[in-house]
């Protein structure tokens, strides 16, 4: 016999306890549970020994991770599901660096002070660390490495752009704020006729050398230390801004977009890859990242109409959009036909 259903209470209990699952996942990562399971199914006792943990406590943890869909259990051993395998280092689409960055003070502390951002509209990151994210990361090499690795795997779905956009008539691509170069290297690998350039802050551009070493050696790609708030190098027929604009407020976005517009030829294209609010009304991810941007960067996620308005203010015109996976969209923009007045 079942008790009376209380769907509203049930929903609320799930919402209020959701962070406990996240905590269990982070603790499992820190203990090395997923890594130990990467080699094959293990018993709780075995895992407890390998991770220096209490066997009964680990058995209870495994039961929760099983219910959360990260493991399967047969009563004796636990094994990783496909979602659980994404939290191991060896997986080619591993999301472990993202999980590690979300477990770092750079993410946790600003979120703990969400209320400050809600009261002031300011990023709580700056209240916690006394500087902006990029200023802080420039002086914290370990956290910069965590951040860069997290950005690289968080941007995996953006690599679909290499196949979903028609690069056949394109000769040269500049990825502005291109991070570790993973998107540009995917585009160059998929389209051997293309040349490319990555514009990044000097300390990040250096990290991109690892992934872009091949195309750089072949003379197909340049790493250009630079600042997207300053004039950008001209000469590419496609400019890309992937997960850059959501970091900045409207005024800063227009400055970045104007610099892209100034660098573009009249028949050039700008591809903006972002989580666009409203592109899938049932999808919570753009809304969660919207608050994440608020607390960490002072940025936001935007609707297609909001991007169209920013583009218009920078002398650009929204021409279309392409859906990528995990809620990402590529917006295609072209010059309005005249250079914007500065
Ligand atoms: C959220 S990350 C996105 C990186 C990459 N496009 C991706 O999708 O993985 C934003 C990038 O902008 C870069 N950035 C921040 N300020 C910059 C500036 N003033 N000029 C150039 N790049 C900048 C950061 O170093 C960082 O790699």
Image (cartoon, rainbow, N blue to C red):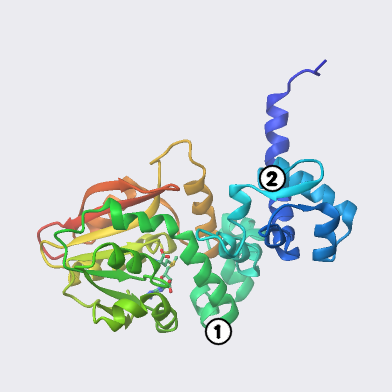
The spot of residue 112 in percent (x, y) is: 67, 59
Q: Which of 119 and 340 is in front in this view?
A: 340
- Which image quarter holds the C terminus? bottom left
- Which image quarter holds the N terminus? top right
The residue pinned by badge 2 equals: 18
Residue 212, quarter of the rendered image: bottom left
Q: For this view, does 269 lie left or right of residue 185?
A: left
Mark 1 Cα shell of 10 Å, populated few (<14), some (14-19), many (≥20):
few
At 22% from the left edge and 78% from the top edge, which residue is drawn?
233
Label for residue 160?
A: none
The spot of residue 200 in percent (x, y) is: 37, 77
Q: For this view, does 77 lie left or right of residue 259?
A: right
Q: How many labels does the image show?
A: 2
Q: How far apart are marks 2 and 1 (CA)?
A: 33 Å
Q: Can you say whether 285 is above or below 240 in the image?
A: above
The spot of residue 61 in percent (x, y) is: 79, 50
Secondary element at image label 2: helix
Label for residue 139?
A: 1
Q: Which of 163 and 339 is in front in this view?
A: 163
Q: Nearer the viewer, residue 9 or 103?
A: 103
Residue 111, quarter of the rendered image: bottom right
Mark 2 Cα shell of 10 Å, populated few (<14), some (14-19), many (≥20):
few
């Amino acid at each position: 016999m079942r008790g009376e259903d209380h769907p509203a209470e049930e929903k609320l209990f799930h919402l209020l306890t959701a962070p406990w699952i996240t905590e269990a996942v982070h603790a499992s990562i820190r203990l090395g549970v997923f890594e130990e399971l990467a080699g094959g199914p293990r018993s709780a006792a075995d895992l407890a020994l390998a991770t220096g943990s209490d066997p009964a406590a680990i058995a209870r943890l495994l039961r929760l991770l099983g219910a959360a869909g990260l493991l399967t259990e047969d009563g004796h051993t636990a094994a990783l599901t496909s979602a659980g395998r994404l939290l191991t280092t060896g997986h080619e689409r591993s999301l472990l660096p993202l999980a590690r960055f979300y477990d770092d003070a750079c993410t946790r502390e600003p979120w703990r002070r969400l209320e400050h951002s809600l009261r002031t509209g300011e990023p709580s990151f700056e209240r916690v660390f006394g500087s902006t994210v990029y200023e802080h990361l420039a002086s914290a090499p370990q956290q910069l490495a965590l951040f860069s690795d997290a950005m690289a795997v968080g941007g995996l779905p953006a690599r679909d752009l290499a196949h979903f956009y028609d690069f056949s008539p394109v000769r040269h691509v500049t990825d502005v704020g291109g991070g570790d170069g993973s998107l540009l290297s995917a585009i160059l690998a998929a389209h051997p006729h293309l040349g490319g350039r990555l514009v990044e802050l000097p300390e990040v551009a250096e990290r991109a050398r690892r992934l872009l070493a091949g195309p750089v050696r072949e003379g197909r790609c340049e790493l250009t230390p630079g600042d997207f708030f300053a004039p950008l190098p001209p000469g590419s027929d496609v400019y890309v801004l992937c997960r850059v604009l959501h970091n900045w407020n409207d005024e800063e976005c227009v400055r970045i977009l104007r610099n892209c517009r100034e660098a573009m030829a009249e028949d050039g294209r700008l591809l903006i890859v972002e989580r666009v609010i409203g592109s899938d009304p049932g999808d919570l991810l753009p809304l969660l990242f919207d608050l994440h941007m608020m607390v960490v960067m002072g940025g936001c996620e935007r609707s297609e109409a909001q991007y169209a308005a920013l583009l218009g203010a920078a002398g650009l015109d929204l021409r279309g959009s392409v859906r990528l996976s995990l809620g990402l969209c590529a917006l295609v923009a072209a010059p309005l036909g005249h250079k914007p007045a500065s």
